[in-house]
Amino acid sequence: MITTAEWVEDSVQIARMAKTLPRWLAEVPLYRGRAPRSGCPEQTDQFLHCFRSLPVISKREIRHGFPHNFLPPDVELRSLLDRDLVELERTSGTLEPATPLLLARGWWSEQERAILQLNDWVARAIESPVRRVTITSPVCSSELCYTGTLARSDRIVDQALFVNLSRHPFLWSETALSRMVEETLEWQPAFLDLDPVYGVLFARYCEEQGIRLPGLKFILSSYEFLSVVHRRRLQRVFGVPVFNLYGSTETGHLLMEDEAGRMLPNVASAFLEIINAGEDGVGELVVTTLTNHYMPLIRYSIGDLVRARPARFQTAFELHGRAQDALTSTRGHRVSVSQIDQCFEGFDGIVHYQLRQESDDRFTLYYVPDQTAVGGIDLPKLRLRLGDLFACNGGLRFEPVDYIPCESSGNSA
């Protein structure tokens, strides 16, 4: 029998889990008593059957009793902190109250270095340490948590310069944007690390002012869903590739877009499952982390929708946005953020948008017009696409707005 590379990767990953999980199930207070008394056998099929019988956990389980729900009784958090073995972080609070996290010191940076290697183009560009500029909500950064006015020197972490000081990008003043651009030009980054909404508004200002970033090689988009609207604008303004990077503070980086547009998993850091998939194959992503031994997550529901794209040599994934942001068609079908976003493929004239479902058969599209677009927006064509997607005749209302308010995490919906 010919064994494909995909099967080899899965086999190695499952064998690793079969050796590691019994210790976590026995030693980590959160998981004690959840596994069968006989344990999970190491044979692939039997292990997976046993593994999938374990309950799915959420942020609620992480918060309850933290950090004693993860640390064995004979391990003191203060001792770990004094020895600089761990760092305490928090999630941004997009869906629920901010959740405390216990991460191995340097773990986040190691996750990033590993997953960037999945994109050969990016890997070559960062063979030696390079500078970056980060543009995201101040409260969403895993490295810094600041707001207000801080000196530039206080916003530098290693090779990264954080330039944004506000949670409300649509309310950036001319003075704030001018400072952000000036700092970026002086820093001379090799790439931008950005939230796509914050990034596209920064790009709009650069385009209006005729500003170019001559040393820029690529853009990494993370922190929230990357729309085709955002990607097109970023590529147009900066003239470099835009690559999607997906993960979360609690799980580390999970998927990286390669040069062919595939979202590839870092199999060394996490085991990914899809549960409750619909007929279209879109389901909820469940993650088992493999490298953070201080706070291992076993079958953790990350709150996002994905679809697997199996291939002979490497399974790729499609990102479909947050589960709670999905809407429902008039036929009762779930419609994901990504499926909505595909309706905007090929359209110019929109900076950012939000589609809200007002009732079973009524929807409102709030959109920020792009004043620089040639020819404006083809609204009849867009209305037709959205109407077909939701099986909605006459229930679509379009409303142009100057800005779209941020959600509690600082991200725009």
Image (tube, rainbow, N blue to C red):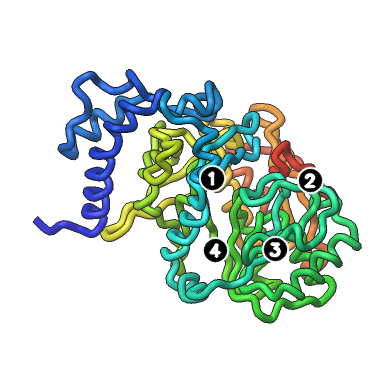
Toward which corner of the image does residue 114 lie, by quadrant?
bottom left
Q: Are marks 4 and 2 in contact (CB under 8 Å)?
A: no
Hey, what amino acid is under mark 3? Leu
How many numbered badges does the structure rendering display? 4
Q: Mark 3 or 1, which is nearer the eye?
A: 3
Q: Report which residue position mark 4 lands on.
A: 243
Describe the element under mark 2 as helix, strand or loop. Answer: loop
- Label 2 CA crowd tier, 10 Å (few <14, some 14–19, many 20+): some
Mark 1, Cα crowd under 10 Å, few <14 / some 14-19 / many 20+, is: some
Q: Is residue 30 visible?
A: no
Q: Amino acid at mark 1?
A: Ser
- Separation of disc 2 and disc 1 at Cα? 24 Å
- The residue at which mark 3 appears reads as 161
Of the residues under marks 4 and 2, which one precedes in the sequence?
4
Are the residues flagged by discs 3 and 1 in contact, CB closer than 8 Å? no
The x, y position of residue 192, in whole percent, is 64, 66
Q: Nearer the viewer, mark 2 or mark 1?
A: 1
Farthest residue in the left direction? Answer: 1
Image coords of residue 289 (percent x, y): 40, 42
Tag 3 or tag 2, which sits nearer the N-term? 3
Taking the spot 63% from the left edge, 37% from the top edge, the residue there is: 392
296 sits to left or right of 3: right
Graded by Cα atoms within 10 Å as few (under 14), some (14 to 19) or many (20 or more), the crowding at tag 4 reads many
Query: Which amino acid, mark 2?
Result: Ile
Q: Which mark is residue 5?
A: none
| Residue drawn where x is 80% and y is 64% of the image | 180
Label 3 vs 1, first from the N-terminus: 3
Q: Mark 2 sits on what residue?
A: 404
Residue shown at the point (47%, 61%) measured from the top left: 113
Mark 3 to mark 1: distance in Å?
20 Å
Amino acid bearing label 4: Phe
Name the residue that disc number 1 marks.
248
